[in-house]
Amino acid sequence: MTTSLPETLEQKLDRLIAAVGALAPREPEPSDLSTADCFVWSAEKGALEPVVRVNRVDMELIKGIDRVRDILVDNTQRFAEGLPANNALLWGARGMGKSSLVKAAHATINRAQKQGTAPLKLIEIHREDIDTLPKLMTILKASTFRFVLFCDDLSFDHDDTSYKSLKAALEGGVEGRPDNVIFYATSNRRHLLPRDMIDNERSTAINPNEAVEEKVSLSDRFGLWLGFHKCSQDDYLLMIDGYARHFALDVDTETLHRDALEWATTRGSRSGRVAWQFTQDLAGRLGRTLAP
């Protein structure tokens, strides 16, 4: 009859270390960036999740913002070709196609790329994950692809200091922004911070100008400021006509415009978003689908 020897202290420590190691979070597997052209940054997992179908509209359907459209597409094209380009802040009236333009520009550039050229990648980062931007950039700078980082509806509230992480990641850090990364953001605020927050800083600071400069200097990190303003009635109807023509909605122009204006009146505004919502309602009433 044999008896097992008592476990030594060294063996106990080895088992304890192994058990603790099993509980520790594992490093995420490197993302395969060749699987898709668009990804969403998952800060919790520390990984890029591919987007199979991107929610976007065709560039030809974006009306009333021709000037800013051309500027953003040109900037994106230069970046895709490895030429100098600027971070872009698309700010202004809600529903006027800011985020739609970013996604459409990305698709337009990739369609125009020469065969054999690596596609431009679009990565969305959520507003609440901005403080993890340096970690994401560390991952991206080692890649051979070029990336447009996109944050929709970016703004900062009182006592929110994560804007400092964004400032450092864009231009102010020791490493700075990687050459293969550019940052596009949309916001309803030109300076990304509430007006009353800036005014409070001005009224309570010993040196008001310095306090305000600290707050608004974030927007200075964006070389392009593209303003979006409320559209006129003519622009609104131009959007309606474009949607109706693209989706072959058979309605006479007079009826289409009358119903579209009535719809805008009930919403209290005219914008690209309102035009799209009207188009969805119209297609539903006609028994049609809005297939891409």
Image (cartoon, helix red, strand yellow):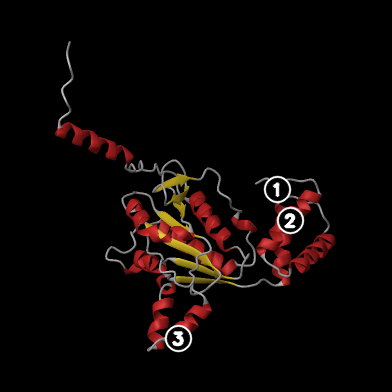
Query: Considering the numbered disc 1 on the image, is that residue within a helix, a strand or a loop?
Result: loop
Residue 212 vs 152, above or below: the answer is: below
- Give x and y (percent) for residue 200: 48, 83
Pinpoint residue 35: horizontal percent, then vertical percent: 44, 40
Q: Quadrant of the N terminus?
A: top left
CB atoms of marks 2 and 1 within 8 Å: yes
Question: Mark 1 or mark 3, which has the lower sequence index?
Answer: 3
State the residue position of label 3.
202
Ranked by sequence position, the earlier of labels 2 and 3 is 3
| Crowding at mark 1 (Cα within 10 Å: few <14, some 14-19, many 20+) | few
Q: Is residue 254 left or right of residue 239?
A: right
Determine the CA span between mark 1 and mark 3. Answer: 50 Å
- Identity of the residue drawn at 55% across and 56% down: 104
Q: Give the residue at mark 1.
A: 290
Q: CA distance from mark 2 to mark 3?
A: 45 Å
- Could you say which is closer to the camera, residue 203 or residue 81? 203
Tell me how far mark 2 sits from mark 1, CA to CA: 9 Å
Q: Amino acid at mark 1?
A: Leu
- In the image: residue 43, left or right of residue 100: left
Name the kind of residue labelled 3 in the image: Arg
Q: Quadrant of residue 141?
A: bottom left
Residue 160 drawn above or below residue 149 = below
Look at the numbered discs 2 and 3 and tell me whether their residues touch, using CB distance below 8 Å.
no
